[in-house]
Amino acid sequence: MPHIVVVGSTMIDMIAYAQRLPGAGETVQGDTFALGFGGKGANQAVMARRCGAKVTMVNTLGDDVFGDTTLKNFLEQGVDTEFINRVPGPSGVAPIWVEPNGTNRIICVPGANNAMTTEQVESALSAMPEIDLVIGQLEIPQAVTAAAFRSAQARAIPTILNPAPFAPISDELLAAVDWLIPNESEFAALHPEGKQPESDQIIEEFAKMLKMRVVVTLGEAGAAYSDRGNPVVRISAPRVSAIDTTGAGDSFVGAFSFALSSGLSESESIRLGCLCASESVTRLGTQSSYPTADQAAELIRSVRGS
Ligand code: RIB
């Protein structure tokens, strides 16, 4: 069982589903509302855990009821919470709007996520003797993720950065990233000339420039991978009918991370990521839409040796 450490965010997702989203100054009526567990870090942790990894979450929660329920959710999911701190004030929340075609718009209000410190993550990582992979995103202070990745790098532990939501990445963080997993818009925002990942050549040049392994998630088109500029490998995703894409990218990262640290090949790991993400978009909600442990086990069997 690989040990994955997620140094990242937790949010409570407040999801409104509507036929049409409001413009400025407009009110529209919605169809459904759901309150659920989210935050890119938490989602990736839960997906990796459902696939079968031992997962430790490093995060800071507020002292509110959202913090209590988030902790309870992690315990129910089997995610280790030993290195989750609590501080006075609100936990992170994410109001989300979803259209009938499954497209979402998200506002993250980080709250206690922003209270994470470099000391917290350095002492958490040093207290864990066996770690196979460290994952980060951009929903907590970048200096904190950079500190965690530097600690990982010093112990030759691979790191995965999911640069979401997009923000310019500091040089100190970039220097400690082994795997970068952007979606199309994050790729374009990170590209020095703003190019979309439209061709193998563009992706190869980007991965070569960064000297990293880059996996670009392409929604229903699957994913494209280049190892530091080597020829792109494309993995397709199954055709599904999407009703809610919220958290699909996180499902990809969590499943991919499990597979990679379990010794599956890069292609198999990307395939598992695509399968889990594709399943997630067929159900409403964020973590609630992810494959269960039994469903994940079936998907893992289907990718082994594929
Ligand atoms: O990627 C989806 C996630 O983004 C949601 O769970 C929301 O909390 C935001 O972090």
Image (tube, rainbow, N blue to C red):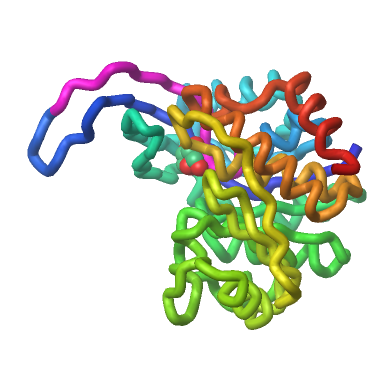
Q: Nearer the viewer, residue 209 or 52?
A: 209
Q: Looking at the rendering, in which quadrant would you find the N terminus?
A: top right
Q: Nearer the viewer, residue 12 or 83?
A: 12
Span colored in magenta: 28-43
Q: Quadrant of residue 207?
A: bottom right
Up the image or down, 280 lies above or below 121; here it is above
Q: Quadrant of residue 259?
A: top right
Residue 118 appears in the figure: no
Q: Residue furthest left?
A: 25
Is 188 in the magenta? Answer: no
Residue 255 appears in the figure: yes
- Give percent across and percent down for residue 248: 55, 39
- Give percent across and percent down for residue 111: 43, 43
Q: Nearer the viewer, residue 303 or 142?
A: 303
Q: Looking at the rendering, in which quadrant would you find the C terminus?
A: top right
Q: Residue visible at 12% across and 43% down?
A: 24
Count every numbered label the image shows and give the total. Answer: 0
- Give percent across and percent down for residue 272: 74, 40
Q: Is residue 40 left or right of residue 19?
A: right
Q: Residue visible at 85% across and 49% down?
A: 261
Up the image or down, 159 lies above or below 191; here it is above
Q: Is residue 27 left or right of residue 126?
A: left
Q: Nearer the viewer, residue 287 or 201?
A: 201
- Give percent across and percent down for residue 156: 87, 66
Q: Residue visible at 22% across and 31% down?
A: 20
Q: Residue visible at 37% across and 42% down?
A: 106
Is 40 in the magenta? Answer: yes
Up the image or down, 86 lies above or below 5; here it is above
